[in-house]
């Protein structure tokens, strides 16, 4: 997985900000085609082959931001302004969430192990001795891997004392836990949407930015300038993503046009309560293990791959589901927007009538910049009585859900197994659980390593977010870091 | 410069800087050379107002995130540049 802050994330933020600024001053439908030229001026030293390709990529990023399914609806002759008019006139269907930009794809060669010139052709030759397939021979005194025999086990890399063996992966393929990434006959990336669980790992891994999320930002900013009041539902992981406390973030959200702000931790409390009583029922009835149900990418694993998990996962709704229910009951006239770190939440939201829109923290960050709202300078808005669900803010971090469930659980002693991130290996293990039950009563599944604070829509690295969470630490970010 | 006088470093933690790479600099305890760190006082700062200026893109000093070292403002600071700038200031 790529580091969060790199050229690509910075340019993405820039694109979002420039588009939003023009949206709010009403010039986007006239000026959209100028944005690639403003972001990539002609005297820029390009990171890709040339500035013209970079501009073309900016164009695609703007299309993704407008919610266009680039894979299917890329019309190179159509100006961006036309796409903008479409997006302003009507909301695009949100699924599939991920789409690919084939011209950005570098068509990486298949996953391979290579022996570099660092090989000293040593006497012990551990690579030769440890290769299970006799795939190593020596040419001119250096080790060499016979491609047709190699099974890519990586043993040679582990044992080489000179670190001469390099593993060159295909980042997107390697990141996808369910094998939904394919290459077409020309070697360019394609997503098998029937298999994709929308976890976003591929999009976070591709160093060329060839896999992008179709943003849900436009439907939401249209709501914000519309007449109907909008309720923001903020995911527990929002704390630490911005330089301000939860109260300040709430105030900032009110400033950018939301009418009301509700913490999703409130709904998480209902989830935790329901899961606790379900756990007790299952434990006492001897029905075997169960899993949590709040990670939407995990729900997709059950829906699309491991059907048996549908029986195993808790029947309670996700925190977003309950929160949206509460919001619609309190203010039936309001629209509801979920703001979180997650791409798969958009899939879940598309099925939930109570949720009208989803944006990520990263998009919210651009919204703040475009509106000139500085979270740090905000007054502290009153969060209301949060006492009953304060512990549920921990839903954002691996182990947090299980902790909140156990806190509300009153039955006999249970064993917890946290699944901290679902990669290929973890997915295989989960498959095996169908026949060999895991040694646990409750399995907490989070598809992102570390929990939601490491999600694909986050702004800061998990290490920073962790330090800034809790109390008013985020109001003095630098001081809080040294503690 | 008097060696005992500490260098005052301010990291802009206005929202625009924070979300455009500034948050990374907050991990200075993990990536900064301890001998350099010992000579600096690192503080957070409100928006330095640099981001609101309409400026020439080519100069990296005009891009967020911004920091100030003894009052002088630098832009486009990533972890690597942060280390270099501070080391320069300490050894000056």
Image (cartoon, coloured by chain):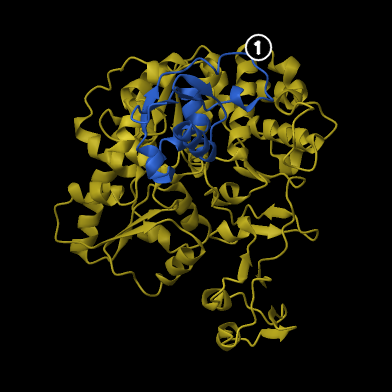
Q: Position of residue A50 (x, y in %)?
A: 80, 38
For this rendering, which residue is in front, A118 or A182?
A118
Is residue A355 visible to us here? no
Q: Residue furthest right?
A: A77
Q: Position of residue A350 (x, y in %)?
A: 52, 38
Give the letter of the chain under mark 1: A
Q: Is residue A481 left or right of residue A32?
A: left
Q: Which residue is mark 1?
A: A26
Picture quarter with the C terminus of chain A:
top left
SS under mark 1: loop
The correct choice, above or below, for A42 with respect to A195 in the image is above
Residue at the (46%, 37%) spot, across then down: B24
Q: Which chain identifier belongs to the blue chain?
A: B
The correct choice, above or below, for A324 with respect to A288 in the image is above
Q: Is residue A293 left or right of residue A277?
A: right
Q: Position of residue A419 (x, y in %)?
A: 37, 58
Give residue A285's quadrant in the image: bottom left
Label 1: how many Cα within 10 Å (few below 14, some 14–19, many 20+): few
Give residue A134's quadrant in the image: bottom right
Q: Is residue A364 left or right of residue A481?
A: right
The correct choice, above or below, for A236 with respect to A120 in the image is above
Residue at the (20%, 61%) spot, across then down: A414
The correct choice, above or below, for A259 with respect to A234 in the image is above
């Amino acid at each position: 997985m790529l580091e969060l802050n790199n050229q690509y994330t910075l340019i993405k933020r820039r694109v979002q900000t420039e588009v939003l600024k023009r949206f709010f001053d009403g010039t986007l439908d006239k000026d959209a085609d100028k944005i690639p030229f403003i972001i990539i001026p002609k005297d820029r030293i390009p990171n890709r082959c040339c500035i013209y390709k970079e501009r073309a990529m900016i164009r695609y990023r703007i299309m993704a931001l407008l919610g266009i399914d680039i894979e299917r609806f890329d019309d190179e002759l159509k100006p961006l302004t036309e796409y903008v008019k479409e997006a302003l006139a009507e909301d695009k269907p949100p699924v599939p969430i991920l789409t690919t930009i084939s011209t950005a794809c570098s068509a990486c060669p298949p996953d391979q192990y290579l022996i570099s010139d660092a090989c000293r052709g040593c006497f012990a030759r551990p690579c030769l001795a440890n290769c299970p397939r006799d795939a190593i021979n020596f040419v001119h005194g250096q080790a060499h891997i016979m491609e047709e025999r190699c099974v890519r086990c990586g043993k040679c890399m582990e044992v080489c004392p000179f670190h001469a063996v390099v593993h060159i992966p295909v980042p997107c393929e390697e990141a996808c836990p369910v094998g939904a990434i394919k290459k077409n006959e020309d070697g360019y990336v394609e997503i098998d949407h029937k298999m994709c669980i929308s976890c976003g790992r591929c999009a976070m891994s591709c160093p060329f930015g060839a896999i992008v999320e179709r943003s849900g930002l436009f439907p939401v900013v249209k709501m914000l300038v519309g007449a109907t009041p909008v309720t923001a539902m903020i995911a527990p992981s929002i704390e630490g993503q911005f330089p301000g406390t939860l109260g300040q973030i709430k105030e900032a959200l009110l400033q950018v046009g939301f009418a009301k702000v509700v913490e999703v931790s409130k709904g998480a409390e209902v989830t935790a309560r329901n899961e606790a009583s379900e756990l007790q029922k299952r434990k006492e009835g001897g029905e075997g293990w169960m899993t949590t149900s709040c990670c939407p990418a995990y729900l997709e694993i059950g829906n699309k791959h491991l059907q048996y998990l549908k029986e195993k996962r808790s029947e309670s709704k996700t925190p977003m589901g309950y929160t949206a229910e509460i919001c619609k009951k309190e203010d039936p006239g309001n629209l509801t927007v979920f703001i979180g770190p997650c791409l798969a939440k958009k899939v879940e939201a598309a099925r939930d009538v109570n949720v009208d829109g989803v944006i990520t923290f990263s998009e919210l960050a651009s919204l703040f910049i475009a509106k000139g709202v500085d979270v740090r300078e905000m007054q502290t808005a009153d969060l209301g009585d949060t006492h009953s669900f304060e512990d549920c803010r921990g839903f954002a971090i691996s182990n947090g859900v299980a902790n909140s469930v156990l806190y509300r659980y009153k039955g006999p002693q249970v064993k917890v197994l946290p699944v901290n991130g679902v990669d290929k290996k973890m997915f295989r293990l989960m498959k095996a659980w169908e026949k060999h039950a895991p040694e646990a009563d409750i399995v907490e599944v989070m598809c992102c390593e570390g929990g939601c604070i490491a999600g694909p829509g986050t702004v800061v690295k998990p290490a920073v977010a962790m330090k800034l969470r809790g109390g008013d630490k985020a109001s003095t970010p630098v001081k809080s870091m040294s503690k | 410069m008097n060696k005992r006088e500490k260098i005052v470093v301010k990291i802009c933690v206005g929202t625009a800087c924070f979300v455009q790479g500034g948050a990374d600099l907050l991990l200075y305890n993990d990536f900064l050379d301890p001998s350099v760190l010992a000579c600096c006082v690192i503080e957070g700062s409100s928006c330095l107002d640099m981001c609101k200026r309409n400026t020439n893109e080519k100069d990296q000093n005009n891009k967020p995130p911004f920091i100030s070292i003894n009052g002088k403002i630098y832009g486009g600071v990533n972890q690597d540049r942060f280390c270099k700038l501070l080391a320069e200031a300490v050894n000056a």
